[in-house]
Image (cartoon, rainbow, N blue to C red):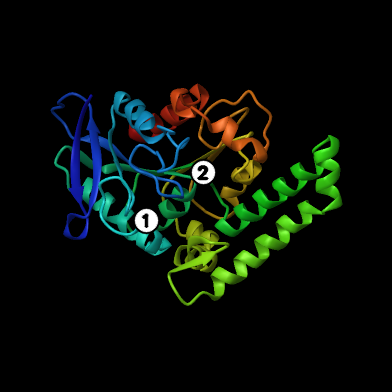
Amino acid sequence: MTEKEVQFGEKGQLFGSLTYPATSPVALPAILIIAGSGPLDRNGNGTKPGQSFHLYNQLAAFLTESGFIVLRYDKRGTGKSHGDFLKTGFWDLIDDAKSALHFLQAQPIVDRHKIFVLGHSEGCMLASEVAKGEGLAGLIFLAGAAQSLAEAQNYQRDLMANSLKKIKGAKGTLIRLLNVGDKVQKQGQKFDRKVSLAKRDVIRYQGVKINAKWFKEHYEYDIYQSLAQVDCPILAVTGSKDVQVAPKQVYEVGKYTTAETETYLIKGMNHMLRDQNEQADILQLKKVYKNIGEKPISEELLTVVKNWLNRYVY
């Protein structure tokens, strides 16, 4: 496997890594990886301690070893890419993903008729939009199919409220006495109203800078209308222990598109595409994700993805 750093986009502001198998006499199929939400670099790592997920570099290595050219990139304002992440909106991310796709299409070693886009989490929403009019060979949705950001947030808030109400002992009694679970829902609604009414791209909420532009554009976006316009095969996979998106929502993809669709719910897999022994509890995410980047991606997921890709390539 060979890996080289590449630069693309308007004025070359985006940086990424292109990985490809040993020299081939023919053009090869290719995959663009679109990252999930947050300030993630090309490897899927964040900026804070405990956010070394090493998700996209592991995916790229597996896919390249399987015979594909793979492009992954630093999101705007992360890694080596230029720009201000906090001022970056949903449509800005789509523009960047399209630039990445067009860069990939222009590579002489890439078979333009066999290009796939793989989205993870928020990347699933971006992928649906990026696919329009591009003649893609297929879309892969990992941990985020057929669900809007607002719906994912409500799902997380419900899980959090229920988990808080189940805490035992004196701590649990105090939480119930103070009605903390219900306050989580009310705080969420207050947050949604504030970002929806914001006049600036970046605002402060409880002392923290928030990308209001990104939230507003997400809230206004219709993921289901976008899915209805997808005209290439779709593979959608989610893990049963995902607490950041509703797992069973993966089965809904086929209801919103006429494209050929396959859906899988992998038992025991979490949002970071790793097998999880611990119970699915949103209050334990920090503990579960600690050192998760050192763990391999779910073997079952990799098998599902590889088998599906092979059917549409060969």
Q: Is residue 260 above or below residue 77?
A: above
Q: In front: mark 1 or mark 2?
A: 1
Residue 282 horizontal/vertical position (percent): 65, 40
- The disc labelled 1 sits on which kind of residue? Val
Q: Is residue 300 above or below residue 35?
A: above
- The span from disc 1 to disc 2 (Cα, nearest Å) is 18 Å
> Which residue bears the numbered disc 2?
261
Q: Quadrant of residue 293?
A: top left
- The disc labelled 2 sits on which kind of residue? Thr
Q: Residue at x 53, y 41 (%)?
A: 143
Query: Left or right: where does residue 245 sit relative to residue 104?
Result: right
Residue 153 horizontal/vertical position (percent): 61, 54
* Label 2 residue SS: strand
Q: Residue at x 67, y 65 (%)?
A: 189
Q: Is residue 305 above or below residue 115?
A: above
Q: Which mark is residue 130?
A: 1
* Label 1 residue SS: helix
